[in-house]
Image (spheres, rainbow, N blue to C red):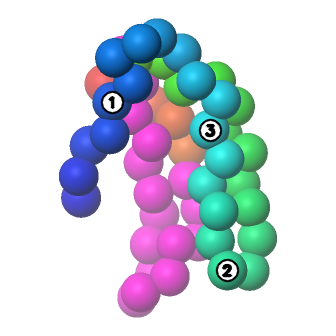
Amino acid sequence: MPAFANPGGVARSILVMPERELDLGIVGPDERIVREIEGTKVVGARVVKA
């Protein structure tokens, strides 16, 4: 999985999926989005410190 960074600082993130959207809130430059996957579908996500 690629890591995406926001070198400009914090950003509000929303993970958009075909069946729903997950509001992940503010994601700082020292944080990463971890996706939970079952088969080929994303079933959840959370923000963790890198």
Q: Is residue 50 above or below residue 3?
A: above
x, y percentage for residue 32? 39, 34
Quadrant for the C terminus in the image:
top left
Answer with left or right where residue 49 lies relative to residue 19: left
Looking at the magenta stretch, what is its main secondary structure?
Answer: strand
Q: Can you name the residue that lies furthest to the bottom here?
A: 39
Say if 23 sits above or below 39 in the image: above
The verdict on residue 47 being magenta is no
Q: Amino acid at mark 3?
A: Ser
Magenta residues span 30-45
Instruction: Residue under label 2, please give it.
Output: 18
Nearer to us in this view, 16 or 32: 16
Vertical relation: 5 (above or below) 41: above
Q: Secondary structure at mark 2?
A: loop
Q: Amino acid at mark 2?
A: Pro
At label 2, counting other C-alpha atoms closer than 10 Å, the crowd grade (few under 14, some 14-19, many 20 or more) is: few
Label 3 neighbour load within 10 Å: few <14, some 14-19, many 20+: some
Which of the two discs, 2 and 1, labels the residue nearer the N terminus?
Answer: 1
Residue 2 in the image: state x and y as whole percent. Answer: 23, 52
Specify the quadrant that holds the N terminus.
Answer: bottom left
Nearest to N terminus: mark 1 or mark 3: 1
Residue matched to label 1: 5
Tag 3 and tag 2, C-beta contact below 8 Å: no
